[in-house]
Image (cartoon, rainbow, N blue to C red):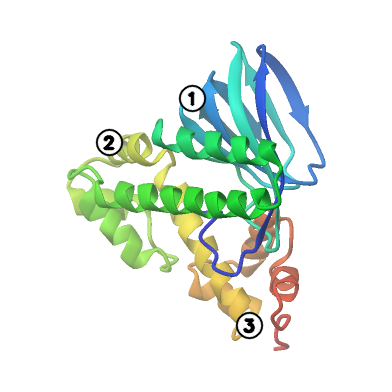
């Protein structure tokens, strides 16, 4: 998840309330990251080959540098936080349905930001990390509340995501259900396909290894479950906007070791 890297340092640029009619817009060359809470209105976000639907009471994360299209048919109300992050994050839209409990935090941040007193910024930063805490808690609870029918497959995924031979069929067999049924239940619960979740786990682990600087890029790829190093390099750059070597360098660790 975008907030799970302990090396990240965040800076708030602006906090504002938006109320607008439905429309379709395209965003390119974004120079900031945004985190928003949707009070009302549903939107469809399209980026590259992915589509995400954001409903009322959801939190939407859009990383810096990502080009996307947003389609909103009805009016919408939301609170938006513009941010800068010291660490390059996964260049993918993330949506979390956290309910009304998150609205209180966003509204409070907006109110404090508007007050603009000497302590407003620090108080807003404290609220930002409280939001991250709530997002992480809901994610953890979501993993612990996996539907019983697919729980053995999810546990197998967490154990074996570094194994390049792992398939969705393997996960379904752990549950004694068809692959089609496993995919459907998994996507309903997580909002991602099993393959997307496996890749998310692999890339998250790759980032940790690259920041450590102890392994070459080919070795990192193999340790994360990518048998094709060329594919790993290409997919990593597409996902983060940086090559694995550049990611390691920009995060303060040695570049790829010579072989």
Q: Position of residue 43 (x, y in %)?
A: 58, 22
Label 3 crowding class (10 Å Cα cut-off): few <14, some 14-19, many 20+? many
Inter-mark Cα distance, 3 to 1: 40 Å
What residue is shown at x 78% (from left), y 42% (from top)? 30
Q: Is residue 7 left or right of residue 252?
A: left
Above-or-below relation of 99 to 182: above
Quarter residue 68 falls in: top right
Q: Residue at x 71, y 52 (%)?
A: 118
Mark 2 vs mark 1: in front? 1
Residue 52 in view of the camera? yes
89 in relation to 245, above or below: above
User: To which residue does mark 2 refer?
Assistant: 181
Q: Residue furthest bottom?
A: 259
Ranked by sequence position, the earlier of labels 3 and 2 is 2
Q: Which residue is mark 1?
A: 55
Is the residue under label 2 in contact with that under label 3 (CB below 8 Å)?
no
Q: Position of residue 151 (x, y in %)?
A: 22, 50
Q: Are marks 3 and 1 in contact (CB under 8 Å)?
A: no
Location of residue 111 in the rendering, given as x and y in whole percent from the top left corner: 60, 35
Rendered-image quadrant of the C terminus = bottom right
Indicate the quadrant where residue 236 lies. Answer: bottom right
Which residue position holds label 3? 213
The label on residue 44 is: none
Task: Quote the CA–CA distance across marks 3 and 2.
Answer: 41 Å
Dot 1 falls on a residue whose secondary structure is loop
Q: Provide the secondary structure element on which disc 2 rests.
A: helix
């Amino acid at each position: 998840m975008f907030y799970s890297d302990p090396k990240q340092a965040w800076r708030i640029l602006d906090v504002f309330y938006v109320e607008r009619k439905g429309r379709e817009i395209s965003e390119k060359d974004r120079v900031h990251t945004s985190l928003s809470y949707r009070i009302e209105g549903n939107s469809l976000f399209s980026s590259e080959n992915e589509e995400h639907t954001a409903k009322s009471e959801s939190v939407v994360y859009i990383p810096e540098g990502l080009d996307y299209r947003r389609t909103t048919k009805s009016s919408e109300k939301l609170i938006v936080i513009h941010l800068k992050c010291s660490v390059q994050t996964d260049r993918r839209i993330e949506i979390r349905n956290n309910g009304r409990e998150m609205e209180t935090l966003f509204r409070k941040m907006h109110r404090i930001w508007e007050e603009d007193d000497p302590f407003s910024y620090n108080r807003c930063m404290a609220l930002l990390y409280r939001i991250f805490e709530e997002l992480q808690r809901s994610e953890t609870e979501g993993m612990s509340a996996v539907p019983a029918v697919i729980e053995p497959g999810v546990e197998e995924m967490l154990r074996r995501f570094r194994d390049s031979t792992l398939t969705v069929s393997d996960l379904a067999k752990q549950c004694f259900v068809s692959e089609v049924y496993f995919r459907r239940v998994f996507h309903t619960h997580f909002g991602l396909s099993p393959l997307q979740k496996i890749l998310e786990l692999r890339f998250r682990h790759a980032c940790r290894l690259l920041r450590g600087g102890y392994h070459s890029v080919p070795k990192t790829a193999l340790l994360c479950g990518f048998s094709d190093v060329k594919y790993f390099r290409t997919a990593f750059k597409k996902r983060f906007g940086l090559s694995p070597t550049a990611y390691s360098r920009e995060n303060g660790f040695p570049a790829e070791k010579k072989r």
